[in-house]
């Protein structure tokens, strides 16, 4: 049985379509990623699956339960870690977990056993009696993940789990997430706008843009779509004629010009750089910088949308955030 199945899922806010008819399934035990810029519809999708927002149209089953017809059963089957911090800094780590397990009706002995288990899992046993205000950002994130696991959910939702963390702490969180998925067998669906995070963690990735899926497959297959090395040229001058000339070459598979950067896909790119620089000069264009790399999910996003994901990394507008929080309160 699929852990998650969505068909034609739609969410609208006052005429604005945040999620536009998406359909997908997540297998039990899979680590599935929603990748895209902020505002693409990732968090809205998570909130619908977690019963915090009611779908405008379409259906979704989580752990075999319809999210619209039996929200309580869905909530018993899931854990969720929100983008926004949701810990009480005045309480200790253990007290935060104790409060959460009481809400799920666990008995005293089982609460103690489960709290000890999840604290050990995220390596916070020695900090259990420390007030959360004294935790580092990475420790707080690990505690939030632990909290989401205390009632043994079948599905764990992680919404931007490493947002705002430094690179080293982010990699540590990745290791914990992988451990949860592989060792504990928890189905995980996460949202992220970090390309390397989706590539490192996810079995499959759905790339979202403007509320729709533009691609869905394993990271390796998505990158194989481009079929070669990617050479990026940072140009000075009007590069339109140069782009058109390069695009007609037999050995160029794909040419994308975005502002002053021309991205070219080809085989054995390292052998072609000198020729490309000479061609640019012939067209009156100076090459300020050259970058050669294997295809990344960033390149895949550029291929499908015509722009890099980092253009839209700014956070969601206050209006959108307010709408989501309003809908959450109504759904609670």
Image: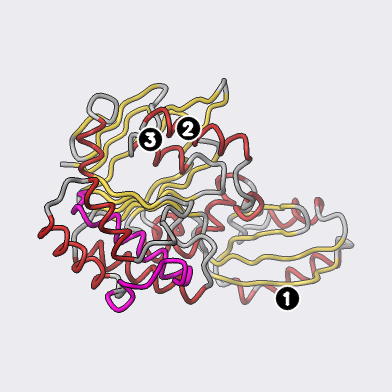
The location of residue 215, given as percent across then percent down, is: 45, 45
The location of residue 13, given as percent across then percent down, is: 53, 25
Nearer the observer, 323 or 277: 323
Q: Residue at x 64, y 67 (%)?
A: 231
Q: Is residue 11 above or below residue 127?
A: above
Name the residue beneath numbered marker 3. Answer: 52
Q: Is residue 64 left or right of residue 240?
A: left
CA–CA distance in space, label 2 to label 3:
15 Å
Q: Is residue 112 magenta?
A: no
Which of pointers 2 and 3 indicates the residue nearer the eye?
A: 3
Q: Is residue 329 above or below residue 95?
A: above
Q: Earlier in the sequence, mark 3 or mark 1?
A: 3
Main structural element of the magenta stretch: helix, strand or loop?
helix
Name the residue beneath numbered marker 2. Answer: 19
Q: Residue at x 52, y 49 (%)?
A: 36
Nearer the observer, 296 or 179: 179
Q: Is residue 143 magenta?
A: yes
Mark 3 residue crowding within 10 angstroms, few (<14) / some (14–19) / many (20+): many
Tell me the element at label 3. loop
Mark 1 residue crowding within 10 angstroms, few (<14) / some (14–19) / many (20+): few
Q: Is residue 309 left or right of residue 101?
A: right
Answer whether labels 2 and 1 touch (C-beta < 8 Å): no
Q: Earlier in the sequence, mark 2 or mark 1?
A: 2
The magenta segment: 125-154
Answer whether labels 3 and 1 touch (C-beta < 8 Å): no
């Amino acid at each position: 049985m699929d852990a998650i199945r969505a068909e034609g899922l739609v969410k609208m806010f006052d005429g604005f379509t945040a999620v536009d008819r998406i359909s997908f399934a997540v297998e039990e035990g899979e680590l599935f990623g929603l990748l895209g810029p902020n505002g693409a519809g990732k968090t809205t999708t998570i909130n619908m699956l977690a019963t915090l927002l009611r779908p405008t149209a379409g259906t979704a089953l989580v752990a075999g339960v319809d999210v619209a017809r039996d929200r309580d059963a869905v909530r018993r089957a899931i854990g969720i870690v929100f983008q926004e911090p949701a810990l009480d800094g005045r309480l200790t780590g253990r007290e935060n977990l104790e409060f959460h397990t009481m809400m799920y009706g666990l008995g005293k002995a089982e609460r103690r056993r489960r709290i000890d288990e999840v604290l050990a899992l995220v390596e916070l046993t020695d900090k259990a009696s420390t007030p959360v205000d004294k935790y580092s950002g990475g420790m707080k994130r690990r505690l939030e993940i632990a909290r989401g696991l205390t009632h043994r959910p079948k599905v764990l939702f992680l919404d931007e789990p490493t947002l705002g963390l430094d690179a080293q702490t982010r990699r540590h969180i990745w290791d914990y997430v992988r451990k949860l998925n592989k060792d504990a067998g928890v189905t995980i669906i996460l949202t992220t706008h970090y390309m390397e995070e989706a590539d490192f963690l996810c079995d499959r990735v759905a790339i979202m843009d403007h509320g729709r899926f533009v691609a869905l497959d394993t990271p390796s297959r998505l990158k194989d779509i481009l079929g070669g090395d990617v050479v990026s040229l940072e140009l000075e001058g009007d590069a339109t004629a140069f782009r058109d000339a390069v695009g007609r070459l037999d050995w160029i598979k794909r040419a994308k010009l975005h502002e002053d950067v021309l991205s070219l896909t080809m085989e054995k790119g390292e052998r072609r750089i000198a020729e490309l620089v000479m061609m640019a000069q012939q067209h009156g264009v100076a090459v300020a910088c050259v970058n050669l790399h294997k295809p990344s999910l960033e390149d895949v996003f550029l291929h499908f949308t015509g722009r890099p994901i980092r253009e839209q990394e700014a956070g969601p507008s206050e209006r959108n955030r307010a709408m989501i929080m309003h809908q959450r309160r109504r759904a609670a």
